[in-house]
Image (tube, rainbow, N blue to C red):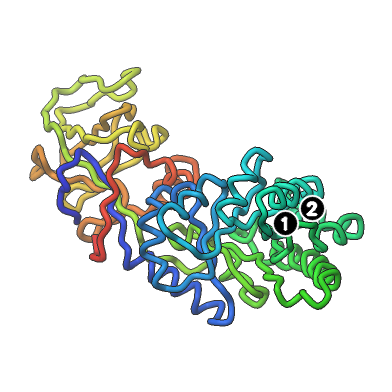
Amino acid sequence: MSTNPKARAWVQVRADALRDNYARVRDHVGLGTGVLPMVKADAYGLGAEDVVRALTPLDPWGFGVAAVSEGVRLRALGFEGRIVVCSPVPPEDVGEAVRSSLQLSISSVDALRHLGQTARSAGRIAEYHVDVDTGMGRSGFDGRNAAGWVAAAAGGVDGARCVGCCTHLHSADENGETVHEQWSLFSAVVDQVVAERGPEASEIVVHVLNSAGVFRASEVARSVVRPGIFLYGGGIGPGQPQPQPVVSVFSTVGLVRSVPAGTTLGYGSTYRSERPERWATLCIGYGDGLPRALSNRGCAILHGTMVPIIGRISMDVTVVDISDVEAVREGDVATLIGSDGSAARTIDEVAAEAGTISYEVLTGLTSRLPRVWTDQDP
């Protein structure tokens, strides 16, 4: 269990586990396939600067982001390699993307023309990836009608050249059939893109697989894969390999008190003690990112024992019933995610109890929680 870094609550991140998960992805797809770790949303809430620092020695193909501002930040941190913006970009952000040498994902001919014009005005050549919609629906050229756009999209314009072609999987965490259905449509489009590029076709990198796709269908890995949640310790679906736990969340016990039967607790008085009980007030709440949906249903670990969350979680504090754990004292450390002795709480278990997904739990951990990096087991 972590030692207290003199904070009321904190997130502990294992750099060794992050690197191990990366290595498992790389080994699974083979050394001939590049790895583009997704570090969007501040590296899923863990801190992009620290994640990039931890993974750069492993020689990733590049890093993937979702917004131009995220790519600009990586440049400010000193990363000089490839940065791919994997979501549509507002026109007003294109200039900054060009100045920072970011590779954009392009979903329309109008966006391509704007990119070319912006790059010409800056005296640069912008690089872009053709985003193909094969069923996700949120971005990309329609893969069912490639004949209507492939020549314009793949051929490039003055000031911008095509260097990649990608699509986004919608259900790889659920089954492999949808991956192959999407791949079938996508690969036909890739053939047309390659034909359009002609002698320059060797420059085209093809990428389709996310974390779940890597392990569902590594046979279609091609040039590059884009792992995300698996790197950070989140599960990727039933029957899939489990990643090493990367993230733990801890809080100190701020108050221990004994209450008589009939004592109410929290906003709305949704909990009432039915017997004399001992309660511990933890210095963490939904203002720190602990999901409020865990009220009266989640739990924490104290002294290696699961203790239930009682009452509604407040912005700043959460109360647990420690009636059966006599050793608890003020200043002790509670585990909200992670392990203590033989007891463990995974990100996915917490997310399931809160009725959400691990992505939301991770990115919801607020800046009030310091990120404490370690190469040691928690």
Numbered circle sitting on residue 141: 2
Instruction: Residue 293 in the image: state x and y as whole percent.
Output: 42, 34
Q: In which quarter of the image is residue 36?
A: bottom right
Tally of numbered discs: 2
Instruction: Residue 314 in the image: state x and y as whole percent.
Output: 31, 27
Label 1 sits on a secondary structure element that is strand
Task: Name the residue carrying label 1.
Answer: 131
| Closer to the camera in the image, 35 or 218 | 35
Instruction: Residue 147 in the image: state x and y as whole percent.
Output: 91, 60
- Mark 2 nearby-residue class (10 Å; few <14, some 14–19, many ≥20): many
| Residue 146 visible, this angle | yes
- Mark 1 nearby-residue class (10 Å; few <14, some 14–19, many ≥20): many
Gap in Å between the C-alphas at discs 2 and 1? 6 Å
Q: Is residue 371 above or below residue 354?
A: below
Do the residues bearing badges 2 and 1 touch, measured as CB atoms within 8 Å? yes
Q: Residue at x 70, y 46 (%)?
A: 138
Q: Which residue is drawn at 8% across and 40% down?
A: 329
Label 2 sits on a secondary structure element that is strand
Instruction: Residue 349 in the image: state x and y as whole percent.
Output: 41, 51
Q: Quadrant of residue 311?
A: top left
| Amino acid on which the number 1 mark rests in the picture | Asp
Residue at the extreme top of the image, as rendered: 268
| Residue 239 visible, this angle | no
| Closer to the camera in the image, 100 or 267 | 100
Q: Quadrant of residue 271?
A: top left
| Amino acid on which the number 2 mark rests in the picture | Phe
